[in-house]
Image (tube, rainbow, N blue to C red):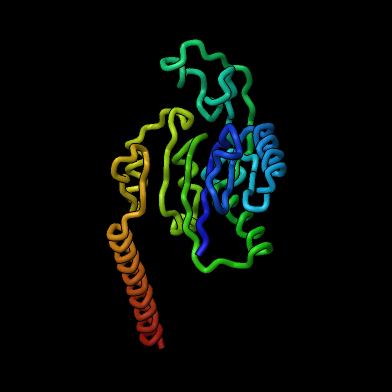
Amino acid sequence: MTNLTVVVGAPAMAAALPAGQVVVVEAEIERARALKQELQELGAVDRVLIVAEVLTIDKCQSVLWYRFNDSRLNGPWPLEHWQNQYPNLVLQQIDERIGRSLAEVLHIWQQQGSAQFGPCEKLLITLVLRQGDAIAALAGCGAWLKDLQSMQLDRPCTGFCDQDDVTSWLNQRGFCPAEGHGAHWKRDPMAMLHLELEESREKIMQMEEQLSSHAVRLLLAQVKR
């Protein structure tokens, strides 16, 4: 069993990263380089993978990245999104970035980890979102979503996104709010069981339709003969 923490948005210091295996996804290239240098000096680079990417739902998806005089607010939201909360905010630059999905990033980690530590039989992922679009990051998990155990949303760096939207998205996939932890969700075993049963029912119905269609084709072939 491997515990993996995925931190989207690098902390100010490497010491703030959790213990164990960590993947850091940081959109600001210079900040990612500085964190990697700090980890090398601490001798912790082997357990931390740092990628300088903007997370999107699909791979190679184009996204505008807005940069401000307050770099904490850099992200996919324009100046108008922030003006009510930060009236003195100044837009400095707009970059067009080609995004990567979180599934792609985790695949890179898996390849490097398998070469270094060997394959893991079970993976438990904790996701901490401190930067970018929360829904895009979650929706880009792909098949890795089954390994996600908990998710924490750090605002305002994630754009004052509607927490209700995040809650709804996660509830539909078997997660529930963690008691007493604010913007924090965890996997609900009973909800997951219900979802698995629903998926099994859908697969059975699809198989029944396929068998029925096959039986009709056989019957028509016999009639023709």
Residue 103 is left or right of residue 82, and the answer is right
The quadrant holding residue 182 is top left
| Callout count | 0
Please tell me whether residue 192 is drawn above or below residue 161 in the rendered image: below
Report the residue at 48% width, 39% height from top. 129
Q: Position of residue 36 (x, y in %)?
A: 68, 41
- Residue nearer the viewer, 99 or 121: 121
Q: Position of residue 151 (x, y in %)?
A: 42, 46
- Residue nearer the viewer, 33 or 86: 33
Report the residue at 33% width, 59% height from top. 192
Residue 31 is left or right of residue 84, and the answer is right
Q: Position of residue 217 (x, y in %)?
A: 39, 79
Image quadrant in which the C terminus is located: bottom left
Q: Position of residue 124 (x, y in %)?
A: 47, 58
Please tell me whether residue 211 is drawn above or below residue 169 in the rendered image: below
Residue extending farthest top: 88
Report the residue at 60% width, 50% height from top. 105
Report the residue at 43% width, 31% height from top. 155
Residue 191 is left or right of residue 31, and the answer is left
